[in-house]
Image: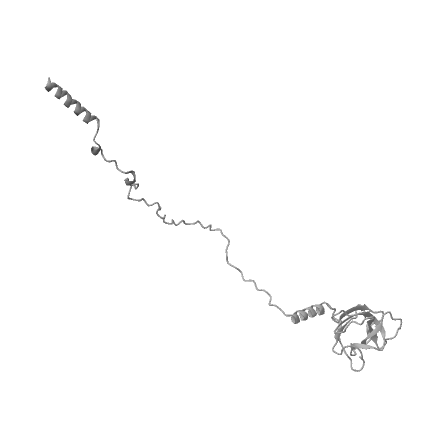
């Protein structure tokens, strides 16, 4: 009886010990912080290998136009003097063969008015009985006008004035034959002018032609 009770008590002690696990025997769990976050120590390179350039042969059409340049000869530049000479030669080329060009200048024995370096030309066109007078270096005359006189008869040959640059031009067809005259003189006349005779102020003129 005593022995049977001891056995029962011992069995109960064993069952109690089996139900409560000793704290010392509890298995240590690994700390979450200790778990390595790197899964693989090998890092794959994301760089793609450079592709080697492939030479592509372009097809060049054989019927392409030629790219050869042609040299074009440009006329040599000319200065103002040469341009003026070319214009004068062109004007002379358009004149009839029997045209006559007479220079105009300050005449020592006849001129008494205006700049002595003024110049001009008188062009005689016998076929049409026309004269063309061109002057430069003559200042414009305010309230007056230049008049051409045909000598020796002193017939009027037209009136004109010059611009601010001293340049003037006149073309006049005469009533009388050009063979009746051998010289001209420019005078400075009042405007208006009722006198049929030349004024005493004489500007440039021509030598006898």
Q: Is residue 31 above or below residue 172?
A: above
Q: Quadrant of residue 3?
A: top left
- Say left or right for 11 vs 56: left
Residue 73 in the image: x percent, y percent? 57, 64
Quarter of the image with the N terminus is top left
Instruction: Look at 19% across and 25% down and name the residue there.
Output: 16
Place of residue 188 in the rendered image (x, y in percent of width and height, measured from the top left)? 82, 74
Q: Position of residue 12 (x, y in %)?
A: 17, 22
Decide if residue 56 is on the left or right side of residue 66: left
* Residue at 13% from the left image edge and 19% from the top image edge: 5
The vertical placement of 188 against 17, above or below, is below
Colouring mode (rainbow / by chain / secondary structure / one colour): one colour
Q: Name the foreground residue: 26 vs 172.
A: 26
**Toward the viewer: 3 or 144?**
3
Quadrant, the C terminus: bottom right
Q: Position of residue 156 (x, y in %)?
A: 85, 72
Q: Is residue 12 visible?
A: yes
Left or right, 60 with reference to 155: left
Above or below for 103 versus 53:
below
Residue 159 vs residue 68, the one in the foreground: 159
* Occupied quadrant, residue 108: bottom right
- Any part of residue 101 in sight: no
Q: Nearer the viewer, residue 141 or 109?
A: 141
């Amino acid at each position: 009886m005593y022995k049977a009770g001891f056995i029962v008590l011992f069995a109960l002690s064993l069952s109690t010990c089996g139900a409560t696990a000793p704290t010392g025997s509890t298995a240590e769990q690994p700390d979450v912080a200790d778990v390595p976050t790197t899964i693989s120590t090998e890092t794959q390179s994301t760089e793609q290998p450079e592709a080697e350039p492939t030479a592509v042969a372009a097809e060049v059409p054989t019927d392409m136009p030629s790219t050869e340049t042609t040299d074009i000869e440009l006329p040599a530049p000319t200065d103002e003097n040469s341009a003026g000479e070319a214009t004068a030669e062109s004007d002379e080329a358009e004149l009839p063969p029997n045209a006559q060009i007479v220079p105009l200048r300050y005449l020592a024995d006849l001129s008494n008015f205006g700049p002595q370096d003024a110049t001009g030309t008188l062009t005689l066109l016998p076929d049409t009985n026309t004269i063309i007078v061109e002057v430069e270096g003559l200042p414009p005359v305010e309230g007056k006008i230049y008049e051409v006189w045909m000598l020796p008869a002193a017939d009027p040959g037209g009136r004109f004035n010059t611009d601010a640059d001293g340049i003037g031009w006149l073309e006049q067809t005469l009533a009388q034959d050009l063979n009746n005259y051998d010289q001209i003189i420019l005078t400075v006349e009042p405007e208006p002018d009722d006198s049929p005779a030349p004024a005493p102020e004489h500007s440039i003129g021509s030598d006898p032609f």
